[in-house]
Amino acid sequence: MLSNAKERNVELQLFYFTQNREKPKLELLEIQDLLSNIFISHLKIIDDYIHISECYFDTNKKDGYLTLNLELYSLEDIQDFMEKDLNQELMAELDTDTKIN
């Protein structure tokens, strides 16, 4: 890992409920195919890429819903934030109230 980077691992769970609960099979397959294409390898958010390390589906045809589980990984460059922090005045003292009822 880079010394000026922040590593993030995030687990995400998405639910999709079909419009027709009586005949959900075709709609669930279409949505699963669409989501597979969207989340095939990575997401681009502005200038950053998020790698998708795991992507798996769970289909409940009886109740008409699809669950997508994603494990996301990103490595964020924090050099700009570190440089901005160097120009800031350091906090000399912090007062806290730790009274517990």
Image (cartoon, rainbow, N blue to C red):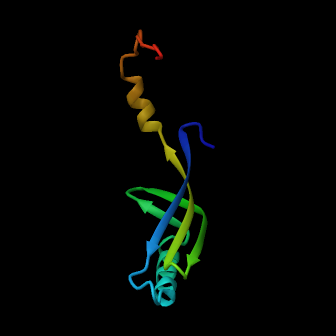
In this view of the protein, which residue sits in the foreground, 12 or 91?
Answer: 12
In this view of the protein, which residue sits in the foreground, 24 or 71?
Answer: 24
In the rendered image, residue 74, in percent from the top left (x then y), is placed at 54, 52
In the rendered image, residue 24, in percent from the top left (x then y), is placed at 48, 86
Q: 11 left or right of 43?
A: right
In this view of the protein, which residue sits in the foreground, 87 or 9?
Answer: 9
Residue sitting at 45 percent across and 88 percent down?
22
Residue sitting at 44 percent across and 75 percent down?
17
Using the rendered view, name the quadrant where residue 1 is placed. top right
In this view of the protein, which residue sits in the foreground, 58 or 7?
Answer: 58
Residue sitting at 42 percent across and 13 percent down?
96
Say above or below: 82 vs 38.
Answer: above
Residue sitting at 59 percent across and 73 percent down?
58
In the rendered image, residue 30, in percent from the top left (x then y), is placed at 47, 85
Say above or below: 54 vs 95.
Answer: below
Say above or below: 98 vs 62.
Answer: above
In the rendered image, residue 64, in percent from the top left (x then y), is placed at 49, 80
Looking at the image, how many numbered discs can be counted on the residues? Answer: 0
